[in-house]
Amino acid sequence: MNTVSIEKSRKTAVLSVRTISMTAMLSAVAYLLAFVEFPVPLSPSFARMDLSDLPALIGAFAFGPLSGLLIELVKNALQLLTTSTGGIGEIANFLMGAAYVVTAGFIYKRHKTKKTALAACVLASVVMGIAAALANYFILLPLFENFMPLDQLIASFAEFLPFIHTKLDVVLFNAFPFNLLKGLVIGGVTMLIYKRLTPILKGR
């Protein structure tokens, strides 16, 4: 093995170690951010949001979609330790977050420019909105029915949006647009801070 090959192998090993360590650090940050919740506009008090997908999106941009996926997986695995939903909420959260960061990571990986990053955030937000609609319809809303009758659940949303009358209405007029907006907000924050974090993440 010549000197060039040895040096290339050394750099690859260092990069792999940094990728693993930074992914672990971002996973820890994502887990902590999951405890900082905010009320959702035009929604009942039990519908809340957090910014725990932010570190996962940063990881997907910096190290690829697999890193973002692992951050979402570790975050939700840690949340299982204190779950109040029997793991159902964590599965739904993982599906929505994974759809978001993997989509953005794949798009940005192909061409790492600011324009591509912007397009990635927008398209990934749409994908997360769709994933959230499916997760709410088939997982989260049925879960809430164990604590609140469906009619009462729908009525709680109708207090804020009077045209909501069915479970599908809840998904179309609340879950989808809210998660679309959430994705755009997280994407916007990422666009503002990512370049400043790059030297730290990449060890430059």
Image: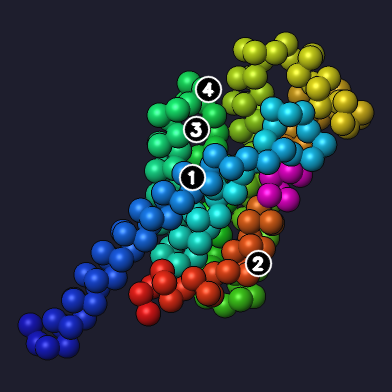
Q: Which circle marks residue 91 in the picture?
A: 3
Residue 178: % across, % down: 74, 43
Magenta range is 177-182
Residue at image coords 70%, 13%: 148
Q: Which mark is residue 204?
A: none
Q: Earlier in the sequence, mark 1 or mark 2?
A: 1
Q: Relative to 67, is 111 above or below?
A: below
In the picture, the quarter occupied by the N terminus is bottom left
The alpha-carbon separation of the residues under discs 4 and 3 comes to 10 Å
Q: State the residue at coordinates (17%, 88%).
A: 4
- Precedes in sequence: disc 2 or disc 4: 4
Mark 4 to mark 1: distance in Å? 18 Å
Q: Earlier in the sequence, mark 4 or mark 3?
A: 4
The residue that appears at 41% across and 69% down in the rendered structure is 201
User: Which residue matches tag 2?
Assistant: 119
Give the labeled residue for mark 1.
Answer: 32
Give the side of residue 30 with respect to residue 22, left or right: right
Amino acid type at mark 3: Ile
